[in-house]
Amino acid sequence: MNKTILHWSYLNFKDVPMDLFLYEDLEEVYLKENYISVIPKWLLNITTLKFIHLAGNNLTELPVDIYMLENLEFLDVSNNELRELPNTLGLLLHLQQLNVSGNQLTELPAELSTMRNLEHLNISKNQLKRLPIQLSECLRLNELNVSDNAELLHIPERIANLPMLQSLAADRCALIYLPAALSKFMNHVRIFHNTAINYIPMVYERFYQSFYDNRQKVTPMPISPKGLFWIRELETNSRLLLPVGTRKVYPVPSAENQVTLYDDCLHALQSLNRHLPVYENTALHRLLPEPYMSAHIINGPIARCTTTNCSSCLYTTYYFMVVKRRGSSSKQLFTCNFCTQYCALQWLSSNVKKYYQLDWKISSDNDVDSISE
Ligand SMILES: [Zn+2]
């Protein structure tokens, strides 16, 4: 069976030509780089369509009835003038690739969570300040690009930790720290040039190139430092912000050696989440003994144990290490998170030729960096 493909890009069209209706079994249509400002209602009746390429037009909105294109697998509306996306986009259950890069979006609809077949999502070059936690339900998501959202402070750990995610790009955002709960199966990461960041979790080490080293030009954090968990690293005297949700960290070696009941409890709840999204269950949240617990459950594990053959999820309490590469001119600090002292010592003994540990202490709210070069 021959599928019908129309190549109508670069033709100065101001409207989608009605002739489209004449083609039977139309599956793919390329309308790139025209001057189209509206997706007409009649187009939504061509339900054979699987692929629509409308990049570089003048669209200011997507029709609410877009869900009628029930077989759509690919939608590229990048480089248009979209200010918001309709909630009904989430009803495109077969959609595998969505590109809305280069628009003026400030928010994404939480309803995107129903797109269980979504594999590639490009939301770069917009004005997003936050990502909806519900994106974490797009379990097939393989490629996520959020680069060039200049006010995006945080990628929720639950999203960074999606099971199929292999490629993550978040260059030139305003991230205050890099999510350390990445899957160890990630094979492409571009998450640098976030100028408030002064350390790199070890999970990014294999993606790190020295030209990413922006420690020379770290700019002050765009948020108030109060109430967050900081440590001060004593060799370079820098203050490092630990992932939001951190409550206690132990040095290695440590005289204290304990696993908290609180983290065990979160671990158990998190396992339930595999079967039903408990993080959205408000009844459950009311039952929880501590108010902060909801926030921990919603956000998900904040890191994974750096020992590769362990990779346990970490929630609030962990063993923490700051290291530098031996014999390297780079000043870059790398950090490790461990579930137990055992894992920490195991990692250290197999990496002692490559890295050395730096001392740190917990930093209080009053311990603010002096303003200097
Ligand atoms: Zn471990």
Image (cartoon, rainbow, N blue to C red):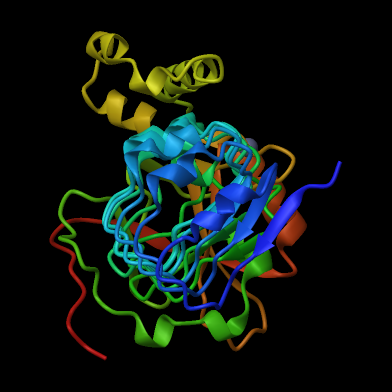
- From the viewer's side, name the closer residue of 242 and 73: 73
- From the viewer's side, name the closer residue of 277 and 370: 277
Q: What residue lies at 67% left-to-right and 84% top-to-bottom?
A: 327
Give the quarter of the figure containing the N terminus. Answer: top right
Q: What residue lies at 31% left-to-right and 54% top-to-bottom?
A: 61
Q: Quadrant of ligand 1?
A: top right
- Whether residue 202 appears in this view of the structure is no
Give the quarter of the figure containing the C terminus. Answer: bottom left
- Whether residue 24 appears in this view of the structure is yes
* Residue 304 percent coordinates (x, y): 56, 42
* Residue 86 percent coordinates (x, y): 32, 42
Where on the picture, by quarter, is residue 197?
bottom left
Where on the picture, by quarter, is residue 293?
top left
Q: What residue lies at 35% left-to-right and 54% top-to-bottom?
A: 154
Left or right, 356 with reference to 157: right
The image shows residue 250, relative to residue 324, as above or below, that is above
* Residue 60 percent coordinates (x, y): 29, 60
* Residue 283 percent coordinates (x, y): 27, 9
Q: What residue lies at 29% left-to-right and 25% top-to-bottom?
A: 294
- From the viewer's side, name the closer residue of 73 and 163: 73
- Name, please, the residue furthest toward the right: 1
